[in-house]
Image: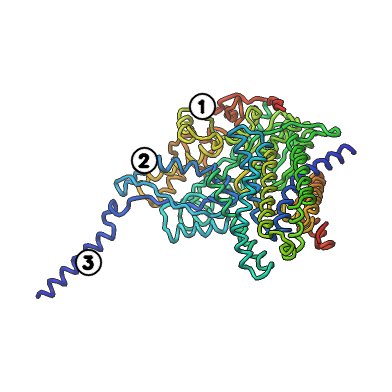
Amino acid sequence: MFVTILDVVIAGLLLGGIYALIAVGLSLQYGVARVLNISHGEFIMLGAFGTWMLYKMAGINPLITLAMCGPVIFLIGFFLHRTLFRSLLNSSASSDIFEGRSLLASFGLLFIIQNIAILVWGADIKGYSYLSYGVNLAGSLFEANRLVTLLFAVVISAAFYLFLACTRLGKAIRAAAQDPATAGLMGVNINKVLALCFGFGALMASFAGGLLSMCYPITATMGMEYTIIAIIVVVLGGLGSIVGSFIGGFLLGLIGSIVTYIEPGLALVAYYVIFTVLLLAKPKGILGK
Amino acid sequence: MKNKVLLGLLVLTVAVVFLCGAGITPSLAKDKIVVGMSRPLSGWLAVIGDSAFKPIYETWVPMVNAQGGIYVKEYKKKLPIELIIYDDKSDVGTMTRLTEKLIVEDKVDFLWPACGTSFVFAQAPIANKHGYILVTAEGGATQIKDMLPSLPYVFVSLSFSDWYELPVFAELLGEAGAKTAYIMYIGDLHGIEYSGVAGIEFPKHGIEIAGIKSVPPGTKDLSPIIKKAKASNADVFCAFGYPDMVLPATGTSMALGYNPKAWIGGPGANFGFYHTTFGPATEGVCGFTTFACNQSAAAKELCDKLYKGKPEEIRDFWGHPLYWAALEFWKAAIEKAGTLDQKVIRDIMATEKLNTMLGPTWFENGLMAKEAHTGEIGQWQKGVFEVVGPKKHATAKFVYPKPAWPKPKK
């Protein structure tokens, strides 16, 4: 019985680690840059394809490709904000209008990125096998690639949290998240900080995509599924809260694992029930402000 | 007088122009056969469309046009094929509107199929209503058999669960001595149908169902089900789902050291990308198939046309030969009919045997005859997806028990 419980809990944490990493990037983009980036899943997809391509064609270790693809996708995100979203921001009379416009713009971005990916890589399924062996933990076997994904998800999220908490740029980002106008008056280059946040969000998505590609097959149309998961986790954890998204991801993973053990068909139902109940009880999410 | 002459000349000119335009010389009027399709060029179904029927028509049409086209006796010449393809964005509603557009506005000569079983269900009545032949590609289900008698213009090419894959698989397993099976299936029409048919066919051959679990589409973690399957000690494991379930199920089975005596996944294991993902670990894994490249000269020729010089990922040993044969059959029916009249062509397709790369091919009550199939069950052996069932078409012996997953490099 104890082994079964441990089995389910560890499986939940493995799944939760992926969810947490997916959500942290979106939380950053929405919490600071105020862009509910519906195309977040497409950046995950780009990270996944980048890793797949480098592993298959050049034999580069997928964990090393994270460091290679991440900066490229960060720059794409940074550039997109400096051009597309900044022009929307400048032309919007209020933040609510900007949020609406940026939501629509990110919808367009979703289709553009997805269809470029289909043109470049085709729409068929790609995959590779990496660390596909079992590791014995407390008497139960778990896939090594998923354990590594969990480890990297925790390390990356923790590193990013420390970056936000302890560095000057991190403080500027937190200040911009709290009150962009005042932060600007205090000498923070708001435009640059917002673009950096969007870029960092894309970077996190890239890491998530690379790690996901180790565990699951990938397609050019895989992004939307992860965007939906990210939105659920971000709302669950509290809009704008990185730590909340992290906790929300693990919570969703655990719930999914428990319900899947009992009846896999009810896992999705359980997600939405918990989501609804939590929003009724605590509308701002676990750590929402 | 002068006016009467001019009037007479005018009437004569109009009459000549009218008679020419009326098509009394059809060989001048018709210069191509226009085929319309609504296909998922984008969206979630593009992953299937791209790897299944698209490589077929992209190879077949240029090949036929390079030979001049299809000979139509009515026009006393060969007519090349021109494709009109609209993107239905993987949406059934869009597909039905585009299908109507192709027929009513574009007035295409023929219709080729949309992608996916649910799309087939939606498109078939439209095509039939307008008297357009529809030879389906991706998609097929037991339920469609019940619809076909009322859809005389619809012809289904793809094999499926009880036509005739699972009866063959059950027979192979029974003869090999399998006693129990664990079934994991995706919670949609495909999974429900395959698990239902397995539930009927396996017991006929002494195989008891040790466990059965439905998995919602998009489930990320299959380890709880794989662990339960492992605990059941079932001889056979069945993963009836799509590639995005079959590939993780394989990886999880490997990682958890789950080594049943037989492992089948489909659709999924029948694709080249399955082998490129798992390499030597595919040894012994079963899937659905129609042919093997080494099966016959015609099979080899088809493989050369479709796969030579291209990545292994694009190979589909189940659907590709059936879709190709269906197009060959359609072409042969047009040539035999000597006309583009769909009723005449349909009557030939419904009643006659014509030669394709499969050999003699025909349709029974709208379904491609199972006797025309050159394979149902495949198994990866030394990097080749061999046909192992039915035995009369086998290119290799069914290996049972399958070898254990190889120890991966750490």
- The kind of secondary structure element at disc 3 is helix
Q: Are marks 2 and 3 in contact (CB under 8 Å)?
A: no
Task: Identify residue type, mark 1.
Answer: Asn
Q: Residue B91, position in %: x, y? A: 58, 55
In percent of width and height, residue A197 lies at 69, 54
Subunit ID for the residue under disc 1: B
Quarter residue B220 falls in: top right
Q: Quadrant of residue B131?
A: bottom left
Residue found at x 59% / y 38%: A53
Q: Which residue is mark 2?
A: B66
Q: Position of residue A194 (x, y in %)?
A: 68, 57
| In the image, farthest residue toward the right | A2
The numbered mark at residue A238 is none
B354 and A80: which one is in front?
A80
Camera-nearest residue between B78 and B365: B78
Residue annotated with mark 1: B294
Q: Residue at x 55, y 46 (%)?
A: B49
Instruction: Identify the subunit bearing mark 3.
Output: B
Q: Earlier in the sequence, mark 2 or mark 3?
A: 3
Q: Is residue A283 above or below residue B2?
A: above
Residue at position x 81%, y 56% in the image: A274
- Which residue position holds label 3? B14
Q: Left or right of B212: which side holds B114?
A: left
Could you tell me if residue B120 is visible in this image? no
Q: Residues within 10 Å of mark 2 (few under 14, many from 20)?
A: few
Does mark 3 fall on the same chain as mark 2?
yes
Please name the amino acid that badge 3 sits on. Answer: Val
Which residue type does callout 2 highlight? Ala
